[in-house]
Image: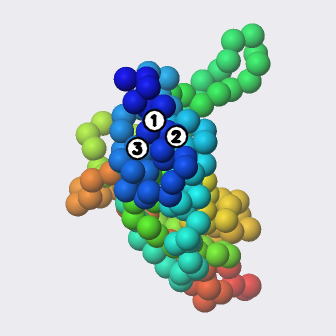
Amino acid sequence: MASDLRYRCYHLSNSHDRAAARREASEPLDRAGVSRMSARAQTAFKAAELKPWRRPVESLTLTLPFPLSVNQLYFNLPNHRGRARTKEYIRWSFLAGTEIMRQRVGRVPGQVWVDFYVEDKPGLRDGDNCCKCMFDALVAQGVIERDDKSIVRGFSFRWSKEIAGARVDIRKATPAASPLDSPS
């Protein structure tokens, strides 16, 4: 089993076989919640999949897995050494990244407006807590440049019973797009 995994990672890192990269990425994560691919294989995967199709677009729509609450993203390290990402967040980030790559969406350069539509599951949830991990995935995959106020000019959040997981609509911000940005 271990030699088979080493062979697949070696094969993946020495070729740009996109189908093999997708199969490798869709496999389950190990017990620590991280990818079974080696760092070299992950680099080859990104080089083969991420760069060639990131063309600038005016707007795009993509789907993501159901987002985690910000309360599930980090945990405190012992002895006041800071915070670290949880296993669930590492797993979700990997799944969201592979989902974005699978959809082969472009990137929206410059200022943007973002609309989030999240599946309305039973239970109490705070909507704005769900946006953090989705913004982080968009930035990590290069769909938007950053998630600060200089790039994200506004966003909206809606619960929806019509979708599974989450849908993200991103469009280039224009000066006439928001009455709040215009001077009085």
Residue 24: numbered disc: 3
The residue where tag 2 is placed is 10
What amino acid is labelled 3 in the image?
A: Glu
Helix, strand, or loop for circle 1? helix
Q: CA distance from mark 2 to mark 1?
A: 5 Å
Residue 65: numbered disc: none
Helix, strand, or loop for circle 2? helix
Q: CA distance from mark 1 to mark 3?
A: 12 Å
Looking at marks 2 and 3 on the same chain, the residue that comes earlier in the sequence is marked by: 2
Residue name at image x 48 percent, y 31 percent: 6
Residue name at image x 64 percent, y 75 percent: 109
Quarter of the figure with residue 64: bottom left
Question: In the figure, is residue 8 to the left or right of 124?
Answer: right
What amino acid is labelled 2 in the image?
A: Tyr
110 and 106: which one is in front?
Answer: 106
Residue 7: numbered disc: 1
Which of the two marks, 2 or 3, is nearer to us in this view? 2
Q: Is residue 110 visible?
A: yes
The spot of residue 122 in percent (x, y) is 26, 40
Residue name at image x 28 percent, y 44 percent: 121
What amino acid is labelled 1 in the image?
A: Tyr
The relative height of residue 82 versus residue 105 in the rendered view (above or below) is above
